[in-house]
């Protein structure tokens, strides 16, 4: 039986508060949310996996699959993040979460047990933990310096809930029944093949007298022949029958327990239960980014708008930084910006120079900013997109009976067919399987389409001329060490693409320039 009891807010006809959604009606249905197709390309699957690790009970991943659609909703989450950065508020909410977890552990244990009264007692204890958790949280938040709209709305709701007759009655009944059960005393008369259970009638406890009498005969440590009984929650059939007979001796207390369980199956308030889950989105994310601040990396709250002028300073790839900081390696940060009519960053340069990482960083920044989260970098201005698309190189799938070029074209066509002027498109090394002439032709056609859409994006390519197609394209180049062209700096700089410059550096390193060859070849 799982009857639905209306919450306090619903009874008053008011909107139920949410700390995660500015408008609670915008909360998506979890069952309909799936990991976005671009997650693997941008390593967002690794990032979200690391953020939510150890928090499976809260089912947080769906929250990371639903970017926000308004700047106001993003600011709403920023406010909560800022309040939770206060150590006191964070500690209080963590304590609440621990109590709620203990409550769920009690309920889970009750489900595993077999005997009625034992199950009911575990349920009663779970309700007691819930009441304590809610009352303490209400008191803590009453004394907290909160500014976030979401937390203030929840605090007001919590005040009303704690002061309600429903909660007061739940607390009172829980304490009354717990006290009544704790006051029960009984005697066991153990015979050769039977056990009799009767009420305790004030008999003296002689165990203390016996211990004191024989204390003087104690001659030091001796082997302990006492039997050690299991201390787990499970009862055996003898204990269960004893308990059944105790219930017959004290019917009022156990009937009250039966009635309490039946009437309070749905004792948890829906808003408080939602808060317990939703606030973990913030706690998990702040715990995640703390590892980067400890390593000396910058984290910032991005300015998100519908204006297509984006910039970021000291940006880096979260997933790569997580790996490198664990290894004690240094992280290379990069800057980028798009101003005025500029729309697409065209990134070229030597292989293994950080181009793909740069493209992922651009995508991560925009997606995480759209979730209302702090991002990697010293400062960031991002665009609030409607959809994000990626096209990264994939292994050929023989089951589709399509060649790699055909597969690339079909995927690109699908992206361009769905993208709008409010979209972000990130392409990484497309058309590497065809001839240079075909790659140039196809790439120009696709870039023309993206620019006609006026979409924002990044294009990682080996075709330098794509960076000069129009005023909407901006050239960025991955650089190498001037002293050693084979050494990558992983710095991506805004400058004209010039593949010859890299070739000249290699030629100089191996003394294959015209001047070097002229010196070595006899005239």
Image: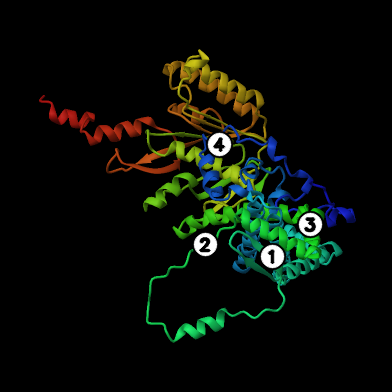
Name which of mark 2 and mark 4 comes first in the sequence: 4
Query: Which residue is rendered at x = 31% and y = 43% of the image?
Result: 482
- Whether residue 162 sits left or right of residue 137 in the image: it is right
Point out the frontmost of discs 3 and 4. Answer: 3
Q: Say if mark 4 contacts mark 1, CB within 8 Å.
A: no
- Provide the residue designation for mark 2: 229
Check disc 4 and report the residue beneath it.
39
Question: Is the residue under label 4 in contact with that under label 3 (CB below 8 Å)?
Answer: no
Task: Give the structural element (helix, strand or loop) at label 2.
Answer: loop
* Real-space Cα separation, disc 2 to disc 1, in angstroms: 20 Å
Which numbered mark, 1 or 3, is in the foreground of this view? 1
Residue 197 is tagged as 1
Name the residue beneath numbered marker 3. Answer: 258
Quarter containing the C terminus? top left
Q: Residues within 10 Å of mark 1 (few under 14, many from 20)?
A: some
Given this view, does label 2 or label 3 mark the residue nearer the observer?
2
Front position among marks 2 and 4? 2
């Amino acid at each position: 039986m799982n009857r639905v009891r209306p919450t306090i807010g619903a009874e008053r006809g008011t909107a139920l508060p949410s700390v995660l959604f500015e408008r609670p009606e915008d909360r998506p249905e979890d069952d309909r949310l799936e990991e976005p197709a671009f997650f693997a390309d941008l390593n967002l699957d690794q990032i979200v996996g690391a953020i939510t690790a150890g928090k499976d009970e809260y089912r947080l991943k769906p929250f990371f699959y639903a970017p926000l659609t308004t700047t106001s909703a993003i600011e709403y989450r920023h406010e909560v993040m800022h309040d939770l950065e206060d150590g006191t508020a964070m500690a209080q909410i963590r304590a609440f979460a621990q109590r709620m977890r203990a409550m769920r552990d009690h309920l889970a244990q009750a489900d595993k047990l077999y005997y009625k009264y034992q199950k009911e007692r575990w349920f009663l204890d779970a309700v007691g933990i819930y009441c304590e958790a809610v009352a303490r949280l209400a008191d803590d938040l009453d004394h907290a310096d909160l500014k976030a709209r979401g937390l203030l709305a929840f605090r007001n709701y919590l005040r009303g809930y704690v002061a309600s007759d429903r909660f007061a009655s739940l607390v009172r009944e829980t304490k009354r029944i717990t006290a009544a059960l704790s006051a029960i005393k009984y005697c066991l008369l153990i015979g050769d093949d039977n056990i009799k259970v009767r009420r305790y009638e004030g008999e003296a406890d002689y165990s203390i007298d016996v211990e004191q009498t024989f204390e003087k005969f104690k001659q030091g440590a001796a082997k302990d022949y006492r039997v050690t009984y299991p201390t787990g929650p499970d009862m055996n059939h003898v204990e269960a029958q004893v308990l059944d007979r105790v219930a017959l001796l004290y019917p009022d207390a156990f009937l009250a327990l039966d009635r309490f369980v039946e009437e309070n199956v749905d004792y948890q308030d829906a808003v408080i239960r939602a808060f317990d889950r939703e606030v973990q989105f913030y706690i998990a994310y702040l715990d995640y980014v703390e590892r980067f601040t400890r390593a000396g990396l910058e984290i910032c709250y991005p300015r998100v708008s519908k204006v297509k002028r984006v910039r970021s300073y000291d940006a880096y790839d979260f997933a790569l930084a997580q790996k490198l900081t664990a290894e004690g390696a240094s992280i290379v940060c990069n800057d980028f910006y798009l101003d005025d009519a500029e729309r697409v960053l065209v990134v070229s340069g030597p292989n293994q120079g950080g181009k793909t990482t740069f493209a992922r960083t651009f995508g991560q920044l925009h997606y995480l900013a759209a979730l209302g989260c702090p991002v990697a970098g010293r400062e960031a201005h991002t665009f609030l997109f409607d959809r994000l698309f990626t096209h990264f190189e994939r292994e050929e799938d023989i089951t589709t009976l399509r060649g790699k070029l055909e597969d690339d074209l079909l995927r690109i066509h699908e992206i361009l067919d769905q993208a709008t002027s409010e979209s972000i498109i990130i392409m990484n090394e497309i058309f590497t399987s065809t001839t240079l002439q075909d790659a140039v032709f196809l790439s120009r056609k696709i870039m023309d389409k993206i620019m006609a859409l006026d979409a924002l994006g990044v294009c990682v390519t080996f075709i330098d001329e794509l960076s000069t197609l129009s005023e909407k394209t901006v050239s960025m180049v991955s650089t190498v060490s001037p002293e050693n062209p084979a050494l990558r700096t992983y710095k991506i700089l805004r400058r004209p693409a010039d593949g010859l410059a890299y070739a000249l550096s290699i030629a100089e390193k191996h003394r294959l320039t015209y001047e070097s060859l002229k010196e070595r070849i006899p005239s």
